[in-house]
Amino acid sequence: MFKGRFEHLIDSKGRLSIPSKFRETLNERYDSRLVVTTYDSCLIAYPLAEWLKLEEKISQLPEFKKDTKAFLRFFYSSATDCAIDKLGRILLPQTLRDYAKLDKDVILIGAFRHMEIWSKPLWDAAEAQASQEDIVNTLERLGL
């Protein structure tokens, strides 16, 4: 599973190096294919196998419900296949970079079954707003 936080740079062509720890996880459990989509002011990168599990769950949603249509239009329509090249980089399309305000300084976050890709300023703001109460409540729900 993906864990940790890493600071990286996006080059002028939109290429982002995947941290070696994340590449190790991909090599051990998955393959070099990622699906990247938008969510919550950042990008989420799923290994293809995890994305396929998510698609299975999505297929069970009632497709004509208003909230499902909104979800599909926003989340699913921005999904893009991003293969990792021989140098361990992915090419992020301009539309995804624009959505997440990715310019140069990037933070990659391990988030269990996926990675999150944040602009450094947006990550700093999100981290400052993180509620200790929410974290404690989640740990309590887990029985910890």
Image (cartoon, rainbow, N blue to C red):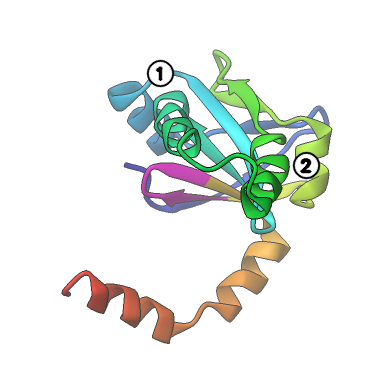
Q: CA distance from mark 1 to mark 2?
A: 24 Å
Residue 142 lies in quadrant: bottom left
| Left or right: 116 as drawn, with respect to 39 | left
Mark sitting earlier along the chain (1/2): 1
Q: Which residue is the site of mark 1?
A: 31
Query: Which residue lies most toward the top here?
Result: 86
What is the magenta range?
108-115
Task: Please tell me whether residue 113 belongs to the stretch shown in magenta.
Answer: yes
| Left or right: 119 as drawn, with respect to 57 | right
Q: Amino acid at mark 2?
A: Arg
What x and y, as percent, mark residue 141?
25, 74
User: Is the residue 5 above or below the residue 46 in the image?
Assistant: below
Secondary element at image label 1:
loop
| Image point (31%, 42%), residue name | 1
- Which residue is at the front of the view, 71 or 91? 71
What x and y, as percent, mark residue 45?
54, 38
| Image point (40%, 18%), residue name | 31
Give neighbour class at mark 2: few <14, some 14-19, many 20+ (Cα, 10 Å).
some
Q: Magenta part mainly helix, strand or loop? A: strand
Q: Amino acid at mark 1?
A: Asp
Q: Which mark is residue 97?
A: 2
What x and y, as percent, mark residue 144?
17, 75
Give neighbour class at mark 1: few <14, some 14-19, many 20+ (Cα, 10 Å).
some
> Contact, CB < 8 Å: mark 1 with mark 2?
no
Q: Is residue 103 visible?
A: no
| Image point (65%, 42%), residue name | 64
| Left or right: 18 as drawn, with respect to 23 | right
Q: Is residue 123 visible?
A: yes
| Image point (32%, 73%), residue name | 138
